[in-house]
Amino acid sequence: MDYKSVIGTIGIILTFVGYAPYVRDVLKRKTTPHLFTWLIWSLAAGISAALQIFGGAGAGAWSTVAVTFISVYILFLSFRQGNRDFTYLDMSCLVLALLSLFLWVVVKQPVWSAFLIVTADILGFIPTMRKSWAKPYSETLSAYWMAGVRHALSITALRQFNILTMLYPVVLVIANTVSIFILTTRRKAIPEHHA
C-alpha cells in the first residue's frame, strides 16, 4: 500500500471518527442539523466525489465518498430531529444551490461543474452558520475541526492535481475554518449557560 492509499484510508477513518460526536449529539438532541444544509451537502458531496473520481483523484476522493454517505445519514436524521427554523435567506440558499446543481446537469462541463457544485456546497453552509450565530452551541464544533483536517489530508492523497480534484477539498478547508471561527467567536460572546 503506497502512502497516498494510507492517507486516503486515514481520511475515511477521520470522516467516521469526526462525525461520530456530531451524530451522537444529534441523537441526544444537543445538535440540531439544518435540513437545507444537509440536503445541499448530500447532493454536493456526492457529485463532488464523482467529479474527483472522474478527474483521477484516486485515494484523495475516498474521504469525499465517505462524507457523502455520512451526509445522507445526517440528512435523514434532519427530517426527524433537525432545525425547522427556515428563513427567506435559507430558502434562497437552497434555491440557489439547487439551481447550481441544475446548471451542472445542463452545462455538462467538468470544470464548470466543479465550480457550480462548490458554490452549492458553500451556500449549504449559510443556513447552518445563520442558525449558529444565534445558537452557537447547536452545532458540534469538533466536527468542523475534523472536517478541516480531513479535507487538508485528502489533498495530500490526490493522485492527480487539477481543478476537478483540488477545488472541493481546498474550498472545504476554508469553509470549515470560517465555521470554526464563527462558532468559537460566538461561544466566547454567549456562555453556554446563557444559550
Image (spheres, rainbow, N blue to C red):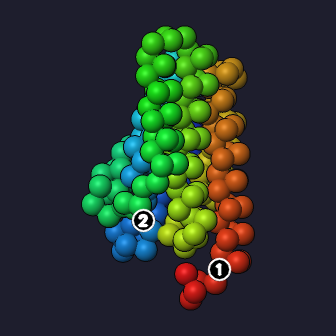
From this view, report whether residue 182 is shown above or below residue 103.
Answer: below
77 above or below 188? above
The residue pinned by badge 1 equals: 190
Q: Amino acid at mark 2?
A: Thr
- Checking the image for residue 32, the label placed there is 2
Answer with left or right where residue 180 lies relative to residue 127. right
Residue 127 picture location, percent across and down? 52, 52
Q: Is residue 90 left or right of residue 155?
A: left
Task: Please name the residue shown 54% across and 71% down the image.
Answer: 135
**Dot 2 alpha-carbon crowd within 10 angstroms: few under 14, some 14 to 19, many 20 or more:** many
Q: Nearer the viewer, residue 100 or 61?
A: 100
Q: Report the residue at 42% width, 65% height from top.
A: 32
**Residue 12 in picture, x, y percent from top left:** 50, 46
| Quadrant location, the N terminus | top right
Give the structural element (helix, strand or loop) at label 2. loop
Q: Earlier in the sequence, mark 2 or mark 1?
A: 2
Could you tell me the amino acid type at mark 1?
Ile
Residue at 43% x, 22% y is 102
Mark 1 surroundings within 10 Å by alpha-carbon count, few (fewer than 14), some (14 through 19), many (20 or more):
some
Name the residue rendered at 61%, 16% in the picture. 111
